[in-house]
Image (cartoon, rainbow, N blue to C red):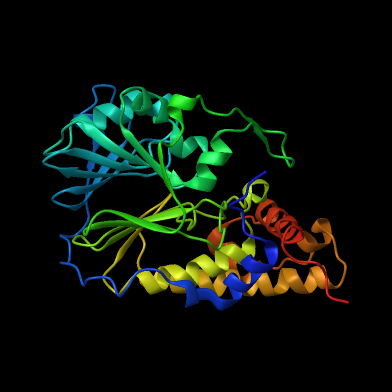
Amino acid sequence: MNPARPTRRHLLKTAMAGAAGAVLGAPVRGLLGAPAQITSLSRQSPEGDGGSLQRLNDDLFVIRIPGEANVVAHTRADGVLLVDSASAAASDALMKAVAALPGAGPVHTLFNTHWHPEQTGANELLGKAGKTIIAHENTRLWLTTDIIWPWNEKRFKRLPKIAQPNKTFYTTGQIDADVRYGHIPDAAHTDGDLYVYFAKQNVLVVGDAVSGAGWPVVDYTTGGWIGGMVGALQRLQTLANAETRVVPGRGPVLGLADLKAQYTMYATIYERLTTLLNKGRGPGEAVAAKPTKEFDDKMGSSDEFVRRAFESLWGYLSPDA
Ligand SMILES: [Zn+2]
């Protein structure tokens, strides 16, 4: 069904090889941005919805609308480039926030870091307006089909053609030398995860391939798995330097040290879960074994995450023996 979907053997190798497939050279050492400035969006939106705007640079911002995933906006003379677009319910609030940005113009390009509705809510609006929507080819394919999550029966309807990404790629691409993007082939969150790297600002936007807010969803229905999370965290470190600011799909802006800490944590959990799988254990037993115990104080209850992460192994690994 999905010709671009790599085999599990390939993915396992990729996860193990980690950074071997890194696609960018050493990022340009960027200007250190001014300290994070977070201002309320309510000055711009009369509803006072509690959203916020974080300035990463003169021309690069994180827009946060309550309950929504992070949106990154890059303003240029020719208009605004967005990385992700929140959910459809938030489109009005998002467009208001974009219009109020310093130096704002019309949106010309939208990146979908992956297919989830929390990222693709403005696709229809922007697609109808004839704007460029860039995504990995796997993301486009998922958006052409209805999807059901088996663990909670949640249903996702395919997007109309006009809302689907209209510019796709397989490995890497660039808008210009300063805005480069690429596939994160480890399948951390889905098999179509992408990053966007803003070289001048030294900002790496990674969508839900990295979680900045608690335990992530492991969407194994569309290829994500815990081995991929480990591989992606290793790979993304090779795209960043000590000053790089990393914008995850949710939560605060992270740095290289956070990627390293997360890598260590998820690699530990991955080891434990594969050991349990190889002993023939099931998801309930994996939860009972508390494979995240030393991280739970900081991260919160992990039962859902452990269950999904364990189930995600089924698609990629067969027990030894
Ligand atoms: Zn997601």
Give the percent coordinates (x, y) of residue 149. 69, 39
Residue closest to the eye, 152 or 126: 126
Q: Quadrant of the C terminus?
A: bottom right
- Look at the picture and state if 190 lies above or below 292: above
Query: Given the current orientation, which residue lies at the most extreme front position?
Result: 3
Residue closest to the eye, 109 or 203: 109
Residue closest to the eye, 211 or 136: 136
Total tally of numbered discs in the picture: 0
Q: Quadrant of the N terminus?
A: top right
Describe residue 60's horizontal placement relative to residue 255 as left or right.
left
Residue under the point 59% across and 50% down: 217
Give the percent coordinates (x, y) of residue 170. 47, 54
Would residue 115 be seen by someone viewing this image from the given angle?
no
Describe residue 175's horizontal placement relative to residue 160 as left or right.
left
Residue under the point 41% across and 30% down: 123
Give the percent coordinates (x, y) of residue 157. 60, 27
Residue under the point 62% across and 50% down: 3
- Look at the picture and state if 121 lies above or below 285: above
Q: Quadrant of residue 316?
A: bottom right
Would residue 195 be seen by someone viewing this image from the given angle?
yes
Residue closest to the eye, 106 or 152: 106
Give the percent coordinates (x, y) of residue 11. 62, 66
Describe residue 243's horizontal placement relative to residue 309 as left or right.
left
